[in-house]
Amino acid sequence: MRKGVVLVVCLCLLFTAYGHAQAESLETITIKGNVIFPQWEQGAIFIDAFDGPDPRVSDEVAWTSIDKPGEYVLEFEGKIGDIVYIYGYNDSADDGPPIEDEDVRLIHQGFGESSVLIETAVVEGIDLIKIKDFMF
């Protein structure tokens, strides 16, 4: 009877340690890039990172905004090997979120439509460009 109790306690401790190790494997991930949009006239530019390809049904992991085209930085807790999906839009009507039909969409042209593979804690060169007729 005692061996069974010791085994159960050991297994519980093992699973607890494994879960704790998984939680500790998160680290600060930084994505850097530029918004390239020569036609920009007005309005903030919002950049979002999601954990899935469809922002309507995915969780947002990070976001930022910049006043005009140029450099941006996203930071979030994640793991090496994760894939995030980067989208941006220019609030051209200057009326804030949510995205409206008159706002201009921006996208990163990665190995998937907007996907970014996190290979290191700092990922650079993820530029966003203006595209035509992009719809979420």
Image: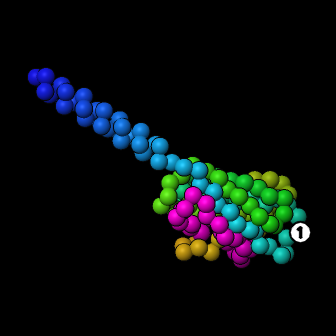
Q: Is residue 84 magenta?
A: no
What residue is at 74 percent from the left and 74 percent from the top? 130
Q: Find residue 100 and report its image quarter.
A: bottom right
| Label 1 sits on residue | 41
Q: In this view of the protein, which residue sits in the foreground, 2 or 87?
A: 2
Q: Find residue 66 and report its image quarter.
A: bottom right
Residue range of the region highlighted in magenta in the rendering:
114-136
Image location (x, y in percent) of residue 74 = 67, 56
What residue is at 71 percent from the left and 77 percent from the top? 132
- Note whether 101 is above or below 13 in the view shown: below
Image location (x, y in percent) of residue 26 = 51, 48
Which of the image's four quarters has the N terminus?
top left
Query: What's the residue type where badge 1 is placed?
Result: Glu
Which of the image's four quarters has the C terminus?
bottom right
Local crowd at mark 1 within 10 Å, few (<14), some, or many (≥20)? few
Left or right for 20, reference 76? left
Left or right for 38, reference 28? right
Image location (x, y in percent) of residue 30 = 63, 57
Q: In this view of the protein, which residue sits in the foreground, 35 or 103?
A: 35
Q: State the residue lying farthest toward the left.
A: 1
Image location (x, y in percent) of residue 12 = 28, 32
Question: How many numbered marks appear?
Answer: 1
- State whether residue 61 appears in this view: no
What residue is at 75 percent from the left and 68 percent from the top? 35
- Note whether 39 is above or below 71 in the view shown: below
Secondary structure character of the magenta stretch overall: loop
Q: State the residue lying farthest toward the right.
A: 41
What residue is at 13 percent from the left and 22 percent from the top? 2
For label 1, the SS is loop
Q: In this view of the protein, which residue sits in the foreground, 115 or 31?
A: 31
- State whether residue 82 appears in this view: yes
